Image (cartoon, helix red, strand yellow):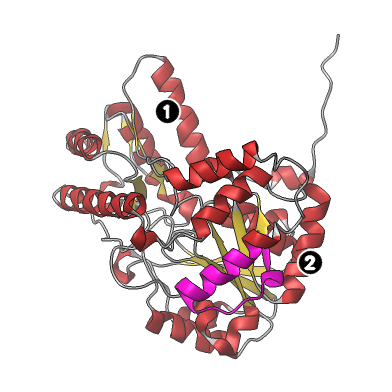
Amino acid sequence: MSEQNHKLSKRLSSLSESATLEMTRKSRELREKGIDIITLSIGEPDFNTPESVKQAGIKAIEDNLTHYPPVPGTNDLRKAIADKLLRDNGLHYKPSQIIVSNGAKQSIMNAFFSILDEGDEVIIPAPFWVSYPEMVKMAGGTPVSIPSTVKQDFKITASQLEQSITPRTKAFIFSSPCNPSGSVYEKEELAELAKVFEQHPNIYVFSDEIYEHIRFEGKHASIASFESIKDQVIVINGLSKGFAMTGWRVGYLAAHQDIVTACITIQGQYTSGSCTISQAAALEAVRTVPAESKELKNMLFQFNKRRDVLYNRLKAIEGVIPNKPKGAFYMFPDISYYFGKGANGFTINNSTDLSIYLLEHAHVALVSGDAFGCDNCIRFSYATTEPLLEEACNRIEKALKHLK
């Protein structure tokens, strides 16, 4: 029987495989060969969901909350999210201005599908989360990146932003705390960016705040807190990172009513509402004040300790220039010192080469910086134990010494 020639969409050909998932796949293949791989490539807390949140999910099952949910989320959860935004962030949103989705990723896609037309430009500061450009392309837009370096703490300036705006600019998307750098925009820095957006009222500002609760110093600030641009801002958040709820798949969006209404229309056509059990658990989570939860305080404490361990170890390795992140659980050191060096006939030309070299020779899985828009760097996730971080650094230091 002849092989069928499957003709796939042009949309698919424009998309790339997620670099984090690709590294996970390569690590698994080596593990299946019996090789001991230390994985520092996954953006997932290595903690369990808080007990009270799990119990809320269990109770929802026992109470038979197993029927179709409203498309935008249950009324109780939307109200609780509005209360949380006011309590934690000083942001005033009505419950009707909230939509709950199957993870923050869907929240972003809902909004992109709602606002983007073919060829609209979306400005993305680099380094950026790997999915941002692909999501923009999927919705018909054109991603435009703004570069930054470790010397800038991976944060762009208002001047860089202004220079990147064109008549085709429709949106801007960033995360703070940032994946992959862990960098945090302070309120004064956000104020400078807000002044630029004031002059461009037709540009939407996507503020991805999924790592809000994983911050080691200072108080989280949202760009939506600037009243002059609030109607332009689309706040993205969820429970995956701050509450170790990655598998529950609950994210949410808060924005002007017109945007939320559009997102509800889109979500209603391709997934409908988020899982009722997950929403019941999320209700317990958003009502929780992290500073009052022993489990969440411990998670933050452990991440802070791991950050310091990793930073001090990387700083001591020749040619590695680490940043010291204020949030999230990533570090994004500059490793360009090793470009042009090699060992055993293998030459390091870029961050992908170095990440492959470290996977094969140090047996440590990392993610190359080019996937995040900064080819001079590599992302470390320290969502693992201190002994494993120490061992990973031992292996990396040894492998790098062979590069000449």
How many numbered markers are drawn?
Answer: 2
The amino acid on which the numbered mark 1 sits, given as a three-letter code, is Ser
Q: Is residue 340 above or below residue 334?
A: above
Q: Residues within 10 Å of mark 2 (few under 14, many from 20)?
A: some
Query: Where is residue 278 shown, x and y percent of the image?
Result: 61, 45
Q: Secondary structure at mark 2?
A: helix
Query: Predominant secondary structure in magenta?
Result: helix
Per the rendered image, the range of residues in magenta is 78-99
Residue 94 magenta-drawn?
yes
Decide which of tag 2 and tag 1 comes sooner along the chain: 1
Snapshot quadrant of residue 388:
top left
Q: Using the image as rendered, state which of residue 36 and residue 212 is in the foreground.
A: 212
Q: Looking at the image, which residue is at 62% across and 76% down? A: 93
Query: Where is residue 35 shown, x and y percent of the image?
Result: 33, 19
State the residue position of label 1: 27
Q: Is residue 273 above or below residue 145?
A: above
Residue 17 in view of the camera: no
Q: Is residue 365 above or below residue 331?
A: above
State the residue position of label 2: 262
Q: Using the image as rendered, state which of residue 230 and residue 334 is in the foreground.
A: 230
Q: Using the image as rendered, state which of residue 351 and residue 132 is in the foreground.
A: 132
- Give the CA distance from mark 2 to mark 1: 40 Å
Observer-side mark, 2 or 1, equals 2
Q: Secondary structure at mark 1?
A: helix
The label shown at residue 404 is none
Query: Where is residue 69 shown, x and y percent of the image?
Result: 75, 50
The N terminus sits in image quarter: top right
Snapshot quadrant of residue 7:
top right
Residue 258 magenta-drawn?
no
Q: Looking at the image, which residue is at 41% across and 43% down? A: 367
Q: Residues within 10 Å of mark 1 (few under 14, many from 20)?
A: many
The C terminus sits in image quarter: top left
